[in-house]
Every structure is written in structure tokens, then in C-alpha cells.
Image (cartoon, rainbow, N blue to C red):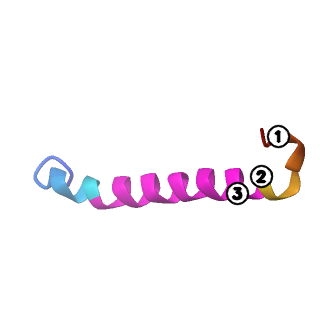
């Protein structure tokens, strides 16, 4: 279980963090591409 192998939690946590970060960057890129009004 997780009590004897706590490091098994690190890989999925890191993968989820990378996926969320990539979605945030993708959303920012799409917003910049489709909303030129927001650029200063």
C-alpha cells in the first residue's frame, strides 16, 4: 500500500502537475491568438 511505498505517489502527482501546467500554457496561447485586443 501507500504506507509502505509512499514514493509511488510522486509519479502520478508530477504527471498531473505537468498536465495542468501544459493546459494553462495552452489556454494562454489560445487566448492570445484569438484575442488580439488583450495585447498591450
Q: Separation of disc 1 and disc 2 at Cα?
A: 7 Å
Q: Residue at x 15, y 46 (%)?
A: 3
Are the residues tagged 3 and 2 within 8 Å (C-beta)?
yes
Q: Which residue is drawn at 65% across and 59% down?
A: 26
Are the residues tagged 1 and 2 within 8 Å (C-beta)?
yes
Identify the residue position indicated by label 1 in the image: 38
Q: Where is residue 5 in the image (x, y as percent from the top left)?
A: 14, 55
Identify the residue position indicated by label 3 in the image: 29
Q: Is mark 2 on a helix, strand or loop?
A: helix
Report the side of 39 relative to 4 (left or right): right
Which stretch is magenta? 11-30
Q: Which residue is drawn at 36% across and 52% down?
A: 13
Marked residue nearer the N-terminal end (3 or 1): 3
Are the residues tagged 3 and 1 within 8 Å (C-beta)?
no
Report the side of 25 relative to 40 (left or right): left
Identify the residue position indicated by label 2 in the image: 32
Q: Where is residue 7 in the image (x, y as percent from the top left)?
A: 17, 55
Q: In which quarter of the image is the N terminus?
A: bottom left
Q: Separation of disc 3 and disc 1 at Cα?
A: 12 Å
The mark found on residue 18 in the picture is none
Q: What element carries label 1?
A: helix
Q: Quadrant of the C terminus?
A: top right
Q: Farthest residue toward the left? A: 4
Query: In front: 38, or 16?
Result: 38
Q: What element carries label 3?
A: helix
Q: Residues within 10 Å of mark 1 (few under 14, many from 20)?
A: few
Amino acid at each position: 500500500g501507500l504506507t509502505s511505498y509512499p514514493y509511488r505517489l510522486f509519479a502520478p502527482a508530477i504527471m498531473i502537475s505537468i498536465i495542468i501546467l501544459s493546459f494553462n500554457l495552452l489556454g494562454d496561447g489560445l487566448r492570445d491568438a484569438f484575442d488580439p485586443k488583450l495585447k498591450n
